[in-house]
């Protein structure tokens, strides 16, 4: 992690974190993740357990993929912490790829003799599927953006997009970043070992529930530098293995209530610098 900053520049995009949701290997929610970041020697890796998406109607619940379950779980946790309602809330979804298992099954079907694809598998293959399921589950009617960045930069790209929307709209934005694992043989080409998701409720003004202020100068990504890592081997292995877990560098400062300037993977060799200030 970089040294504590002197503060963001005047051109920085900023917002306050009013809610956090997290789900990943050995990290069932944000309180557990915060405790592990503060005391990393207590971290115990374990397979991510994805809860059933009870907020979806039965038909959609049966069709829900891992990425849908992941974003619904983390998004709902962030909303609960912030006290916000989902129906009028802008959202930004970001992931390095689609749903890993669904992609694997589609490839198997295309490689078979009949090449028939399940309609459910097909509509779950689009990159904005989690956003669509979110709208159904949460009765969300506001604008939703879905994006990805080259390989490991999707958390930084999503954060930057969400901060721009906070600035231009003057409204709260919910950022949901997710990745799911690929079965073999795709895992050999893209070795994501498990599912990880994080959600941040970003607000333009501080509130009683605010835990930190984040500020980004977009021009920082023009400067070549290494991205930051974590000091603990287990948590660093998780951060390096799953693109969405690049968020742990920022969340480490939030969990410790420690002001810092962190560098997040964004463009190849050009990280995004984020100033984190506790509230």
Image: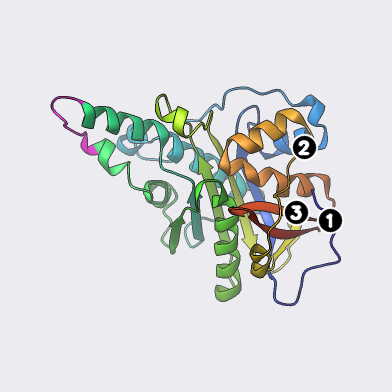
* Residues drawn in magenta: 112-119
Q: Looking at the picture, how far across and down is residue 135, in whole percent?
A: 40, 52
Q: Is residue 117 left or right of residue 95?
A: left
x and y percentages locating residue 43 in the rendered image: 74, 26
Q: Residue furthest left?
A: 114
By secondary structure, the bulk of the magenta-drawn segment is best described as loop
Crowd class of label 1 (few under 14; some 14 to 19; many from 20; radius 10 Å) = many
- Taking depth in this image into account, of 163 and 208 the one nearest to the observer is 163
Check contact, mark 3 vs mark 2: CB within 8 A: no
Q: Secondary structure at mark 2?
A: helix
Image location (x, y in percent) of residue 211: 76, 54
Q: Nearer the viewer, residue 235 or 271?
A: 271
| Residues packed near mark 2 inside 10 Å, few (<14), some (14 to 19) or many (20 plus) | many
Q: Does residue 168 lie above or below 223 as drawn?
A: below
Find disc 1 in the rendering and name its residue: 259
Q: Is residue 269 left or right of residue 251?
A: left
Q: Nearer the viewer, mark 3 or mark 2?
A: 3
Rounded to the nearest angstrom, the CA distance separating label 3 from label 2 is 15 Å
Location of mark 3 (residue)? 262
Q: Which quarter of the picture shows residue 10? A: bottom right
């Amino acid at each position: 992690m970089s040294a504590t900053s002197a503060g963001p520049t005047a051109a920085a995009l900023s917002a306050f974190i009013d809610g956090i949701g997290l789900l990943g290997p050995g990290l069932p929610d944000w309180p557990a993740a915060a405790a592990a970041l503060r005391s990393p020697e207590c971290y115990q890796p374990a397979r991510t357990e994805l809860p059933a998406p009870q907020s979806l109607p039965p038909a959609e619940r049966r069709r829900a993929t891992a990425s849908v379950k992941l974003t619904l779980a983390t998004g709902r946790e962030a909303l609960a912490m912030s006290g916000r309602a989902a129906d009028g809330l802008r959202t930004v979804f970001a992931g390095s790829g689609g749903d890993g298992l669904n992609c694997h099954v589609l490839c198997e079907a295309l490689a078979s003799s009949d090449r028939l694809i399940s309609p459910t598998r097909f509509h779950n293959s689009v990159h904005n599927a989690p956003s669509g399921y979110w709208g159904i589950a949460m009765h969300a009617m506001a604008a939703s953006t879905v994006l990805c960045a080259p390989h490991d930069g999707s958390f930084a790209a999503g954060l930057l997009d969400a901060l721009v929307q906070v600035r231009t709209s003057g409204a709260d934005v919910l950022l949901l970043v997710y990745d799911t694992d690929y079965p073999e043989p795709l895992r050999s080409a893209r070795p994501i070992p498990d599912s990880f998701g994080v959600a941040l409720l970003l607000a333009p003004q501080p509130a009683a529930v605010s835990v930190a202020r984040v500020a980004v100068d977009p021009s920082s990504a023009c400067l070549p530098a290494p991205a930051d890592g974590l000091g603990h081997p287990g948590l660093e292995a998780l951060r390096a293995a799953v693109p969405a877990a690049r968020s742990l560098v920022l969340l480490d400062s939030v969990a410790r209530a420690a002001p810092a300037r962190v560098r997040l993977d964004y463009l190849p060799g050009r990280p995004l610098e984020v100033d984190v200030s506790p509230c």
